[in-house]
Image (tube, rainbow, N blue to C red):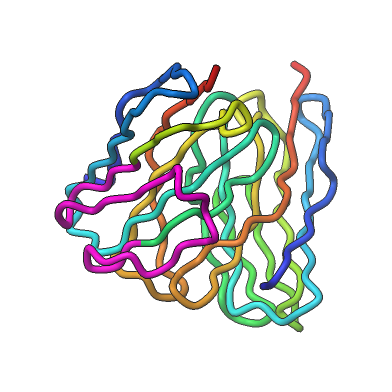
Amino acid sequence: DTEVTQTPKHLVMGMTNKKSLKCEQHMGHRAMYWYKQKAKKPPELMFVYSYEKLSINESVPSRFSPECPNSSLLNLHLHALQPEDSALYLCASSQIAVKQETQYFGPGTRLLVL
Amino acid sequence: GQQVMQIPQYQHVQEGEDFTTYCNSSTTLSNIQWYKQRPGGHPVFLIQLVKSGEVKKQKRLTFQFGEAKKNSSLHITATQTTDVGTYFCASNNAGNMLTFGGGTRLMVKP
């Protein structure tokens, strides 16, 4: 099973809402990632979790708050987002967070902030 | 951090024609990975190249890593409509941080 699942598939939220994106993998991977992808652009790394601990935060605004409750789950809590945060949010996982490890991407959550 | 430039941004081809996308870096890369993203889809890992001058093939796809490990190419022979999508090259930093090239969007006319 090389599947990473993400819910919801689509999300529309207002700027005052609080919502969460969820990601799950059952491949036994110990590294999980959040990426943001704007239309016609490449994915941009937001966060890296290694062994359930946040190891990399790419200067992401605090309105995005990641959480890794266990080795299979990764959440992204959203609060007070701006319209420019509308994008495809991709979760990925790899065996471990070292160079050259293949990352497996989930289908993403398409977020629209009104 | 390292930057990977990718050209062309877009390519329209007639079905059956060949297609090539190129990635270049000003610094030596530890590796290069290639991903395909179908319209409305998510990036799917295709292959990884690690060795200088490495060439790998997957059916009609040929991947090359330059001798200096600063450039790479993906060549598709005799494109099909199923090849439509955006092809990204990417390289890993420490911590497995992936830096993507800008992508090449391939459109195939039947």
In magenta segment, residue A56: yes
> For residue B74, which quarter of the picture?
bottom right
On the rendered structure, is A76 left or right of A28?
A: right
Q: Residue at x 48, y 25 (%)?
A: A111
> For residue B31, which quarter of the picture?
bottom right
Q: Nearer the viewer, residue B69 or A56?
A: A56
Q: Which percent across, then down, holds residue A35?
A: 49, 47
On the rendered structure, is B104 left or right of A27?
A: right
Q: Nearer the viewer, residue B70 or A20?
A: A20
Q: Residue at x 41, y 19 (%)?
A: A10
On the rendered structure, is B48 left or right of B8?
A: left
Majority secondary structure in the magenta region = strand
Q: Nearer the viewer, residue A6 or B75?
A: A6
Q: Image height check: is A106 above or below B56?
A: above
Q: Which percent across, then down, holds residue A113?
A: 53, 22
Which of the image's four quarters has the C terminus of chain A? top right
Q: Image height check: is B7 above or below B36?
A: below
Q: How many marks?
A: 0
Q: Nearer the viewer, residue A30 or B77?
A: A30
Q: Residue at x 67, y 73 (%)?
A: B1
In magenta segment, residue B89: no
Q: Which percent across, then down, holds residue A68?
A: 23, 53
Q: Residue at x 28, y 36 (%)?
A: A22
Q: Image height check: is B108 above or below A53?
A: above
Q: Which percent across, then down, holds residue A18?
A: 35, 28
Which of the image's four quarters has the N terminus of chain A? top left
Magenta-tinted stretch: A49-76
On the rendered structure, is A74 left or right of B78?
A: left
